[in-house]
Amino acid sequence: MNDEDQQDLQAPTAPGGTHPATGTLSAERIAAKALETRLLGGERKLRRREVAAGAGLSLLSARKLWRALGFPNFGDEDVAFTERDQAALSTVVDLVRSGVLTEEAAISVTRAIGQMTDRMVVWQIEALVEDMVHEQGVTDAVARKRLVNELPMLVDALEEMLVYSWRRQLNAGVQRLGVRAEAGLQASEEGREGDEDDAPLPLARAVGFADLVSYTSLSRRMNEKTLARLVQRFENKCAEIISVGGGRLVKTVGDEVLYVAETPAAGAEISLALAQAFTEDEILPEARVAMVWGRILSRLGDIYGPTVNLAARLTSLADPGTVLIDSMTASALDQDERFILLPQPAENVRGFGEIHPVLLKRGEGKGLVLD
């Protein structure tokens, strides 16, 4: 039993019955405990050593997995786990013992699950609270209390959508593994000797950045709610355009998004669509956009390598509402009539020396069409 439970049990009855009688839990605490039991698959009855032993693990190995999932540290006497925790631990252990995964891979995959679901839960709670504040006209604090009572009606639906989305995303990833677009394979050979297998970085991708202009000065003039809506509008529009273009949004950092696409042409279409969308948006400022075709390393859901760094540098050189690419990317797009390539003056860029930016503009065709 934690400190809050103790406080609820000891709360005296006040005149008018505004506090629960001694020995009873408040309505909020009862709702929270019921929701916890449902989410955890039962009441907390097990200590960490009991869970580890039940899964046939040392406590050290169990703690590695719990830390990967993002769990806080528990003491030996904390009754913090349920039988479902033990079953989940056993699932990962069985994958390692059967040789399906190495211990290192199991921890990495587990960490991916922990980090992604943590961010997802925070995002969902904030979205639900914000909606309640707007629709019900209550304060943020009241909305957060009410949400505990409303979440039980959403749990099954949210869980179903999570599993559905994961399966769809996994299938898309498998398709990307098995089917490399011919244009992408040809373009990945540009400027290199040897073949596809000799590259020091394994993946050839179009890497792009979109950066909102004057975001810092705008954020200083906005209140918290207005700024949150601006950021959400920016993220939503980027996510829609990138997904329609067949790309993947790698991450959003404040006023900037990082995305990848399978081919130079796909990356170019997404980049032009992003620049146009923010130029035409009535609320958001314009964006600087840059895209580079090259090889990257993909780890922990992020991407790394000189290609990523060059795309970031080019973004800072782009004028608002425009898209810059480098000369190598331009050579990969040179024969594509959908794009116009306008060489720009050479620039000295930190870490790269002299580079030759190229302004990318729309040629023939309509570009990406959003429903």
Image (cartoon, rainbow, N blue to C red):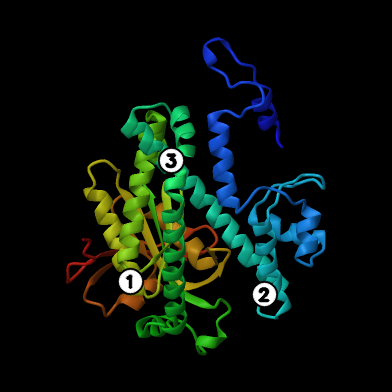
Q: Earlier in the sequence, mark 3 or mark 1?
A: 3
Which amino acid is tagged 3? Glu
Disc marking residue 150: 3
Measure the C-alpha gap from mark 1 to mark 2. Answer: 37 Å
Disc marking residue 266: 1
- Badge 1 crowding class, 10 Å Cα cut-off, few under 14, some 14 to 19, many 20 or more, is some
Left or right of 59, for residue 332: left
Circle nearer the viewer, 2 or 3:
3
- Badge 2 crowding class, 10 Å Cα cut-off, few under 14, some 14 to 19, many 20 or more, is some
Q: Position of residue 49 (x, y in %)?
A: 81, 55
Residue drawn where x is 41% and y is 31% of the image: 224
Q: Position of residue 364 (x, y in %)?
A: 17, 71
Q: Earlier in the sequence, mark 1 or mark 2?
A: 2
Q: Which of marks 2 and 3 is nearer the N terminus?
A: 2
- Badge 3 crowding class, 10 Å Cα cut-off, few under 14, some 14 to 19, many 20 or more, is few
Left or right of 345, for residue 109: right
Q: Position of residue 371 (x, y in %)?
A: 21, 61
Q: Element type at marker 2?
A: helix
**Nearest the camera: 114 or 95?**
95
- Quadrant for residue 77, please give it: top right
Asked if residue 355 shows in the view, the reply is no
Q: Element type at marker 3?
A: helix
